[in-house]
Amino acid sequence: MSDKIFPSWPDTAPQLIEVAAGRAPADTVIRKGIWVNVHTREQLPDHDIAIKAGRIAYVGPDASYCTGPKTQIIEANGRYMIPGLCDAHMHIESGMLTPAEFARAVIPHGTTSMFTDPHEIANVLGLDGVRYMHDEALMQPVNIFTQMPSCAPSAPGLETTGYEISAEDVAEAMNWPGIIGLGEMMNFPGVANADPKMLAEIAATQRAGKTVGGHYASPDLGPDFAAYVAGGPADDHEGTCEADAIARVRQGMRSMMRLGSAWYDVESQITAVTEKGLDPRNFILCTDDCHSGTLVNDGHMNRVVRHAIACGCDPVVALQMATINTATHFGLEREIGSITPGRRADVILTSSLTELPIEVVIARGQIVAESGSIKVDCPHYDWPASARGTVHLGHELTAQDFELTAPAGANSVTANVIGVVENQAPTKALQAELPVVDGLVEGTDEVCQIALVERHRATGGVTNAFVSGFGYSGKMAMASTVAHDSHHMIVVGTDRAQMALAANRLAEAGGGITLYKDGEELALIELPIAGLMSDSPATDVAAKAQKMVEAMQACGCSLNNAYMQHSLLALVVIPELRISDLGLVDVRTFQKIPVIEPVQ
């Protein structure tokens, strides 16, 4: 059942009233569970839930009066009945899956509502790509709300994307049925400096009565932060410490605390609630980015809620942060986020509020998963040919494309180096003395080469620089067409010939991730849709992703979720140092800087 045809509360109110009044039978009754009420923070035993037309008609101690001979009975057997979980901010493309396969992966984990920002595909395919994601999202048996991407490119003048999103695109998309608001406003300097295009996008969203997503990645909480908040973004997920969370909620924003595959920002911020005692209503949990391996092996929003509880948060407060707080933020409190009359019947049965085993998942009144197994179909969109075959290099690359020439006569150089930080989105701006051999700058045991290969317009452009922190050794290279946010191709390696092999392989495969060592391909994840996603099941993609992890480890990398770090090295809106098709970018100043420092 798609969101396009799912009946509204007004449309179903007569049926709900008849059931609640006992004049008509419910379609389904969940019997004798503990009702976890996220409006009041109560746990009420021996309660029933009556469902009609996919919505809740009654919650109370005895639904037998609205139970008929054809009513489906689901026995809760004293288990907790909690609302379906909501992910307040996420990118489906980060799972390397289409919306259908992402839904199939997370439904057994209890996620029944997602607020997705498809700005990854927007960078590759523009408004058409957003529409494909939006349309497939509406086909799913759970609620997938789409935020219209705001920043493609994320930092104008510092990167070149496949397509650009305009204020006119945003205004058009606000009329689409599944659009819930504006995706994260990453161009925070633009907002702080009153950039007309950014403000036009925000205005179009606000005039439509929808929510403006935020992304303030700077540690500076002074005038620039104040100016950003004044511009209109209503939430932010880029906080990394308690002070960040407090600053945001004090200014009327919602603080979105994320636990993704590589972002561990809940523990450092939730103390604003658990220790400082701030009102938890303005705190929300989200994932931001989860790859398929995390989804298959560890979970989704259930993982985030468990983690918040392990960090000292009261279990029902943690549930509020993943249900009613999210619904309220997006203006959907009367649709989702709680087990109360009129809301969509999204309910989880679990035997523990702290361990949170997801035993039965009900979405829109239908059992969609049980004991970890999905029970419904997740339909696929008919992706057009234009969404495939999006890797255009211009020519076959060779080792020479990855050379970085030293100044004449130099035996060594001082290079600006991107420093990877484990489990964090920010990088460090480092410098290193690198040797020169036959006029070319070489890496060291600590520093290897990184290249950004243009793949949208077949320019043949390659930007070369250096990165540290991966720990690679031997002759190897890893390449990926997932390169947030412009999604060119990132190649990291210790050997230029291997880098050329890896890049050319992805052009041949139509996109994905590959790793070469000593001329042999150790792992490959094919991502044929926009070079970002696979329409294969999550288990298949996760198995290939695990081989990629093992291949990276075989090359000396021991970082947690190192691939996520790899894919973010071109994200020119998160400090400190990034690479783009236009050069090396210092995100602290939003200026390009030289790879090799000039000799003083």
Image: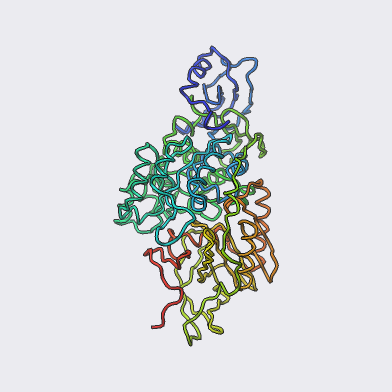
Q: Is residue 451 above or below residue 166?
A: below
Q: Quadrant of the C terminus?
A: bottom left
Q: Quadrant of the N terminus?
A: top right
Which one is in front, 224 or 98?
98
The quarter holding residue 73 reads top right
Q: Is residue 208 above or below residue 454?
A: above
Position in image of residue 103 (x %, y %): 59, 41
Residue at the spot x=64%, y=26% of the render? 75
Position in image of residue 486 (x %, y %): 49, 57
Label tally? 0
Position in image of residue 272 (x %, y %): 41, 49
Which one is in front, 158 or 344?
158
The quarter holding residue 219 reads bottom left
Residue at the spot x=45%, y=49% of the render? 270
The quarter holding residue 401 reads bottom right
Q: Is residue 590 above or below residue 350?
A: below
Position in image of residue 32 (x %, y %): 59, 25
Residue lying furthest top: 23
How is the structure coloured here? rainbow
